[in-house]
Image (tube, helix red, strand yellow):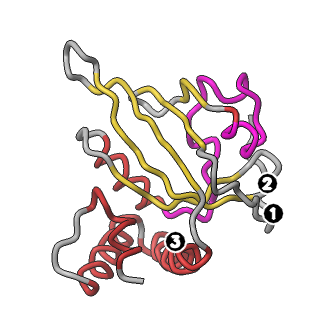
Amino acid sequence: MSKPIPIDEEIELDPKRYIVSETDEKGKITFCNDYFMEVAGYSKEELIGKPHSIIRHPDMPRVVFKLLWETISQGKNINAVVKNLAKDGRYYWIFTEFESRRDTDTGKIIGYTASRKSISKFVIEVIAKLYKELLEIEKESGVEESEKYLIMFLKEKGDDIEFSNIMEEIHRFY
């Protein structure tokens, strides 16, 4: 399945509904609720078993997913603001809460659950500007430099930044 070509049209989300998905430990979709399918424009058959990156928008800096995977693979939860890409090329911004799921007998991580909701236009404006800067750095100098910039950006805003709540930290400053 080829990636859709992004178009500059936003999907307005229902603030009373949540988009929910679950993946295995490698990030392949194992569950998605009806609202996820409705917004993303994919059928259940097109989503189940596919990498969650199927909905990744090219405007998203890789460093965000690097930090996200580093955090959840350690069994820590994380919140993130993400711009996703629908099947028809439109986009939608969401605030996502990622949680690890563990095997009850072994404690081993067996997958992840993500619950998403709409986010304010103000936060989107702030995050979009930051993400654009991070993307430019990644294109010129790579993900490592992008991460250094993000760390410096956050340190300028406050002393104790927890990466597991990186998006909440950003939101707190604006």
Indicate the amino acid at tag 1. Ile
CA distance for labels 2 and 1: 5 Å
Q: Is residue 132 above or below residue 110?
A: below
Asked if the residues shown at circle 2 and circle 1 are in contact, with their CB atoms under 8 angstroms apart, the answer is yes
Asked if the residues shown at circle 2 and circle 3 are in contact, with their CB atoms under 8 angstroms apart, the answer is no
Q: Residues within 10 Å of mark 1 (few under 14, many from 20)?
A: few
Residue 93 location, quadrant: bottom right
Q: Residue furthest bottom?
A: 156
| Residue holding disc 2 | 89
Q: Quadrant of the N terminus?
A: top right
Image coordinates of residue 113 in percent, x first then y, are: 44, 35
In the image, what residue occupies the spot 26% across and 87% down? 156
| Residue holding disc 1 | 7
Examine the structure image and report whether residue 117 is included in the region drawn in magenta. no
Magenta stretch, residue numbers: 35-61
CA distance for labels 3 and 1: 18 Å
Indicate the amino acid at tag 3. Leu
Q: Residue furthest front?
A: 16
What count of labels does the image hold?
3
Examine the structure image and report whether residue 45 is included in the region drawn in magenta. yes
| Residue holding disc 3 | 135
Indicate the amino acid at tag 2. Gly
Query: Which of pointers 2 and 3 indicates the residue nearer the eye?
Result: 2
- First of labels 2, 3 by sequence position: 2
- First of labels 3, 1 by sequence position: 1
In the image, what residue occupies the spot 34% across and 56% down? 67
Q: Secondary structure at mark 1?
A: loop
Q: Secondary structure at mark 3?
A: helix
In the image, what residue occupies the spot 63% across and 47% down? 17
Q: Secondary structure at mark 2?
A: loop
Q: Pick the residue in front: 16 or 29.
A: 16
